[in-house]
């Protein structure tokens, strides 16, 4: 129960963070989850909480929603669901924390990796890529936010429309894990706590968005994510190679 409470508190804080800035919270949360839940449960449990977090963020900020690019993103995400939903069945789920750690390091520090990822210059391809990454490493990164920032000057539109797009991604991710037989009922107490905290975090973040600045967090976030990623990689290495 203590572990569940701590993880739910982390979800509250990361949900609020994402509601304020549009990025960062989901990656911090997925990096922390291997310390609290079994490897096979990380992506599906994270998917439920991020689905709620993004759906509530989109709902609370619905006046700022813009659907101009959403339908392209949706089509790409559904295509990604079909492709990566098959591929993930060939992955050893116990290694997911390793994939998460490597992915965090690449997206945080590798300019080459980010240049390759950012070549997805259509919302169809972004939806496809983010769904694929979401299925394998839980959090697909801020690709859609980066593109939305090119088209909108209003941060409210970017954050809210981005949240709607990520609602699609996390829904697709959950469909994959339901099809694979993951039993969500085994984690119902944790999920209830996480859903409540995700909702509260979204509500809180929306109201704080115009009142506080988190520029300082942008400076320390890469180092925080790096520490989390290295811990995940070292733990897997010790388990399998030493």
Image (cartoon, rainbow, N blue to C red):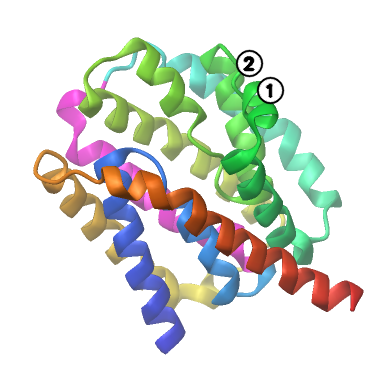
Image point 72% across, 64% down: which residue? 233
* Residue 33, percent from left and from top: 54, 67
Image point 42% across, 57% down: which residue? 49
Secondary structure at numbered mark 2: loop
Task: Work out which residue is located at the far right of the displayed protein and give it.
Answer: 241
Mark 2–mark 1 Cα distance, whole angstroms, equals 5 Å
Residue topped by disc 2: 119
Residue 116 circle label = 1
Contact, mark 2 vs mark 1 (Cβ under 8 Å): yes
- In the rendered view, tell whether residue 69 sits above or below residue 4: above
Q: Quadrant of residue 151?
A: top left
Task: Work out which residue is located at the far bottom of the displayed protein and give it.
Answer: 1
- In the rendered view, tell whether residue 184 sits above or below residue 217: below
Q: Is residue 168 magenta?
A: no
Image point 24% across, 43% down: which residue? 20
Relative to 148, 202 lies left or right: left
**Where's the N terminus, which quadrant?**
bottom left
Secondary structure predominantly adopted by residues drawn in magenta: helix
Q: Which residues are magenta?
A: 41-65
- In the rendered view, tell whether residue 21 sits above or below residue 193: above
* Residue 44, percent from left and from top: 57, 58
* Residue 82, percent from left and from top: 70, 32
Image point 45% across, 16% down: which residue? 71
Relative to 196, 109 lies left or right: right
Secondary structure at numbered mark 1: helix
Q: Residues within 10 Å of mark 1 (few under 14, many from 20)?
A: few
* Residue 228, percent from left and from top: 57, 63
Instruction: Answer yes or no: is residue 31 visible.
Output: yes
Between 224 and 173, the residue placed more toward the observer is: 224
Q: Residues within 10 Å of mark 2 (few under 14, many from 20)?
A: few
């Amino acid at each position: 129960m203590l572990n569940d409470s701590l993880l739910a508190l982390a979800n509250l804080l990361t949900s609020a963070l994402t509601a304020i800035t549009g990025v960062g919270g989901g990656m911090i949360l997925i990096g922390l989850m291997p310390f609290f839940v079994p490897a096979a449960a990380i992506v599906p449990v994270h998917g439920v909480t991020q689905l709620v977090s993004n759906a509530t963020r989109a709902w609370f900020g619905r006046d700022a929603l813009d659907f101009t690019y959403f339908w392209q993103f949706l089509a790409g995400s559904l295509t990604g669901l079909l492709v990566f939903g098959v591929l993930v069945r060939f992955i050893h789920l116990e290694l997911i924390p390793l994939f998460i750690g490597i992915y965090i390091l690449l997206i945080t520090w590798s300019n080459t990796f980010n240049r390759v990822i950012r070549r997805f210059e259509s919302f169809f391809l972004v939806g496809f890529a983010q769904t694929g990454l979401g299925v394998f490493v839980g959090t697909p990164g801020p690709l859609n936010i980066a593109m939305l920032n090119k088209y909108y000057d209003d941060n409210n539109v970017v954050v809210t429309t981005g949240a709607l797009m990520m609602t699609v991604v996390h829904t697709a991710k959950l469909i994959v894990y339901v099809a694979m037989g993951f039993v969500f009922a085994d984690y119902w107490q944790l999920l209830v706590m996480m859903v409540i905290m995700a909702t509260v975090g979204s509500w809180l973040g929306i109201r704080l968005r115009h009142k506080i600045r988190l520029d300082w967090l942008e400076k320390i976030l890469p180092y925080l994510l790096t520490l989390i990623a290295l811990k995940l990689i070292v733990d897997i290495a010790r388990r399998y190679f030493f």
